[in-house]
Image (spheres, rainbow, N blue to C red):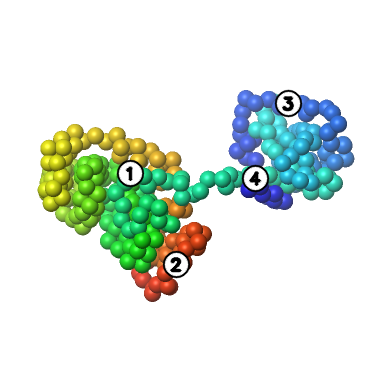
Amino acid sequence: MTVVRPLRSLVFAVALAVVGCHAQTPEQGAGKLSPELARRVEVLLRSRTKVPPNYDIHIGPRTKSEVAGYDQIVVTFTAAGQASKPLTFLLSSDGKTLAQFSKFDLSKDPKELVSAANRPARGGPANAPVVIVGFDDLECPYCAKMHAQLFPALTERYKNQVHIVYRDFPLDQHPWAMRAAIDANCLAAQSHTGYWNMVDNVHSHAADLGGDAKSLDKAKEALDTMAREEGTRQKVDAAALNACIARQDDTAVKASIKEAEALGVDSTPALFINGEKLEGALPLEYVYRMIDNALIAAGQTPPPQAPQTPPAVKPGS
């Protein structure tokens, strides 16, 4: 998508702070602006950007742009031998309008930006019209509240229209969160039901595990016991589960953390609804609205309007 917006308030402070890049003399040629038009461009830029008088403005020649009816010009600002990064503007063919050019890639489906592959799921199938990916910290009290309040409501309201998965994002300040994530993933390797039962159990009893250095060893022992007991209930390979728990391989969890950070996640809980990020203290109705909009975009009919409910919890740290 291409957006052309009239030149209004621009701030070049960052660009002007770039050092070590020397100004280049604009190319001479048929595309060179007339002195009168170049002055009009310069006066406009100075008035709109409040460029100090000691800065020189260098305006390059017209070149072909991707926008019909507009040519492209490159402008640099220099002072004391230092130059800004080149800034690109659009100049209308009649020389009466200066604009800026922004180009955004719409070729990728936002739903594909956050992977839900190879993760235990609740709700509908992997090809459900709406995929919800939650980055979760099993020691985070806000995540526990969201887990208890939000997801039961979503699965009840949307049934098979939503596919819900959790990705790992244990925070450094939570001493046993990494252990909990690894133990839950050890279960997930053999039983997706066991994984979700473990997640339910940890979120329900996180307060009992403590959150300080003195209780850390006991918390880890309790988590390992939870995982083994759930493994017994699910009749998994006990030897393989015990070996996984003992190994405490954090490779997959760290990869999940890295992906979350690349997506701008810095606190928990964080949700992505078909790629649209949700964070902050939002009423559940806002979450419904996001899901409903995603369903409509997928050609699906949302369920009837839900009654008013208490607001969802705000992210914690």
Q: Residue at x 35, y 57 (%)?
A: 124
Query: What residue sits right under mark 4 in the picture?
Result: 102
Crowd tier of the residue under label 2, counting other residues whose Cα lies within 10 Å: few below 14, some 14–19, many 20 or above: some
- Seen from the viewer's position, the closer of residues 92 and 17 is 92
Q: CA distance from mark 3 to mark 2?
A: 57 Å
Query: What residue sits right under mark 2 in the picture?
Result: 302
Left or right, residue 19 beside residue 136: right
Crowd tier of the residue under label 4, counting other residues whose Cα lies within 10 Å: few below 14, some 14–19, many 20 or above: few
The residue type indicated by label 3 comes to Gln
The picture places residue 280, in percent across and down from the top left corner, at 41, 57
The image quadrant of residue 261 is top left
Earlier in the chain: of badge 4 and badge 3, it is: 3
Q: CA distance from mark 1 to mark 2?
A: 27 Å
Q: Residue at x 83, y 38 (%)?
A: 38
Earlier in the chain: of badge 1 and badge 3, it is: 3
Mark drawn on residue 118: 1
